[in-house]
């Protein structure tokens, strides 16, 4: 990303809320959307004498995430106090990790829109508790504090300053979201604040290897805001430098309405937070057995799954991306193909027919009574000309609604009509009843043919073999 005579150097700090049922150091619920300040206790609120207890499930999920991004998991880690004073941080400090994070290094890989591969190194991933949430009234000078989020387990993923433009940041962030969802450690809903991003950005003269003074744009909770903040801050810094000014290290916020960043406060360094080891939590040993267990949960990640689908099943890039949009869908697709369905046909029905019914009835894929083998049986009946596609859709809907055995429903719908004599008879009836349409077709109105074919299918109640019927209709019209 060139801005005048400068290029941007960008690093990201991505915050991911883990999908645990309880908070990192207490038993309070992490359910989103509860009434303000109803999911708190003495530990959340920082009452004197309250003591933290580490949530094992959060640490297991954190280890799984580290392995998914190729980080080195520490055999021993510890927690530290990060001291700062905000209204939504009732203890006056945050329990975080400083010099011994649980995960070191790693990489986030993605493909840019021009097809080029990017691999951005991670400095570290550490585990910490989230702060509360402040909201500010636009009309009256009032701020409201909700501490329900306070103490929720949070991963902070820190990248090396290797991103160069807004597209890099977008690709990085989307890959993080896709991966943590795939390995089932976070829902990563940006609109709910469970995935947030801070952008560190500096400019340097094109060709230079020295880093400039960076600013940090905080609390970006949408892909559009991340892109907008990067572009706006780069333009602002270039304007300052072009006028002979110097960049001040500070924390800024992004105003999406004005498409500008605004100063928030001077940027803190590590020494400003006065880190010291958390005295109420002992160092944590991470067993080798945990690392092996969580590695088995990671499995094949979506980027590799897409590559295999393209190579093994000859799916297009688009279809492979759709089939790996969730882990559940990828596994359902693979199982359907293994049960005998054609890959392209399975992909088509999983993108169109099943989602339509699920949206109408508010079902998720994991709630369906139809097993992959059942879908494969329906598709096989279409492939073998036992059923038309229209009849297969009816079978699918009946099976989904009733939970019936697909083979029984397929048998009850009867075999597809393929007898040429019977089909010719139907076609003759349709042509005799639609003389005007035939005349228009012969006069050059090619769209009328679709109407005639539709009438043939309608009279057969969808049981006619469309391939045979199309060929015989063309034959009859050519006479």
Image: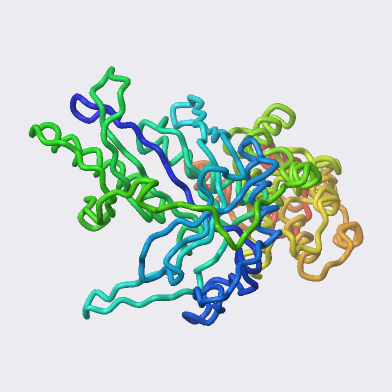
Q: Position of residue 64 (x, y in %)?
A: 68, 46
Left or right of 139 on screen, residue 196: right
Q: Is residue 358 among what the camera can see?
A: yes
From the top left corner, tell me how far across and down residue 283 is, in percent.
65, 51
Q: Is residue 273 above or below residue 52?
A: above
Query: Quadrant where the N terminus lies?
Result: top left
- The answer to which of 92 and 215 lies nearer the viewer is 92
Horizontally, residue 394 falls left or right of residue 109, namely right
Residue reaching furthest top? 207
Foreground pick, 336 / 415: 336
Which residue is painted at 52% across and 36% down in the image? Answer: 122
Q: Looking at the image, which residue is at 27% across and 79% down?
A: 142
At horizontal 65% and vertical 73% (from top left) the residue drawn is 27
Quadrant for the C terminus, please. Answer: top right
> In terms of image quadrants, where is residue 394?
bottom right
* In front of the other: 276 or 389: 276
Name above or below for residue 45 compared with residue 252. Answer: below
Nearest the eye: 305 or 343 = 305
User: Residue 287 appears at what percent x and percent y?
Assistant: 77, 46
């Amino acid at each position: 990303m060139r801005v005048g005579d400068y290029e941007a150097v960008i690093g990201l700090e991505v915050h991911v809320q883990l999908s645990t049922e309880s908070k990192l150091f207490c038993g309070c619920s992490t359910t989103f959307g509860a009434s303000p300040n109803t999911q708190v206790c003495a530990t959340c609120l920082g009452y004197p004498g309250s003591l933290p207890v580490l949530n094992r499930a959060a640490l297991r999920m954190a280890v799984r995430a580290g392995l998914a991004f190729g980080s080195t998991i520490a055999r021993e880690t510890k927690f530290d106090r990060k001291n700062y004073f905000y209204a939504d941080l009732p203890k006056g400090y945050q329990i975080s990790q400083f010099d011994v994070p649980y995960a070191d290094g790693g990489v986030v890989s993605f493909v840019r829109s021009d097809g080029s591969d990017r691999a951005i190194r991670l400095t570290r991933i550490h585990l910490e508790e989230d702060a509360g949430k402040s909201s500010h009234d636009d009309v009256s000078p009032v701020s409201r504090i909700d501490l329900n989020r306070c103490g929720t387990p949070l991963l902070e993923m820190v990248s090396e300053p290797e991103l160069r433009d807004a597209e890099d940041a977008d690709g990085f962030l989307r890959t993080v979201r896709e991966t943590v969802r795939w390995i089932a450690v976070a829902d990563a809903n940006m609109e709910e604040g469970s995935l947030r991003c801070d952008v560190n950005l500096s400019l340097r003269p094109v060709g230079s290897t020295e880093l400039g003074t960076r600013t940090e744009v905080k609390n970006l909770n949408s892909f559009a805001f991340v892109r907008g903040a990067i572009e706006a801050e780069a333009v602002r810094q270039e304007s300052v430098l072009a006028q002979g000014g110097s960049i001040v290290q500070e924390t800024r916020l992004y105003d999406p309405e004005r498409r500008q960043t605004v100063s928030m406060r001077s940027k803190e360094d590590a020494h400003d937070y006065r880190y010291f080891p958390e005295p109420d939590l002992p160092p944590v040993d991470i067993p080798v057995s945990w690392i092996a267990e969580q590695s088995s949960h990671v499995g094949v990640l979506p980027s590799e799954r897409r590559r295999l689908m393209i190579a093994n099943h000859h799916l297009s890039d688009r279809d492979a991306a759709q089939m790996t949009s969730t882990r559940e869908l990828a596994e359902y697709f693979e199982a359907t193909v293994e049960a005998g369905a054609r890959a392209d046909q399975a992909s088509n029905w999983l993108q169109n027919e099943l989602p339509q019914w699920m949206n109408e009835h508010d079902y998720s894929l994991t709630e369906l009574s139809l097993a992959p083998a059942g879908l494969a049986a329906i598709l096989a009946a279409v492939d073998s000309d036992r059923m038309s596609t229209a009849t297969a859709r009816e079978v699918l809907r009946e099976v989904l609604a009733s939970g019936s055995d697909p083979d029984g429903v397929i048998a009850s719908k009867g075999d597809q009509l393929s007898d040429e004599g019977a089909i010719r008879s139907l076609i003759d009836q349709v042509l005799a009843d639609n003389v005007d349409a035939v005349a228009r077709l012969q006069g050059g109105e090619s769209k009328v043919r679709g109407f005639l074919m539709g009438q043939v299918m309608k009279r057969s109640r969808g049981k006619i073999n469309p391939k045979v019927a199309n060929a015989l209709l063309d034959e009859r019209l050519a006479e």
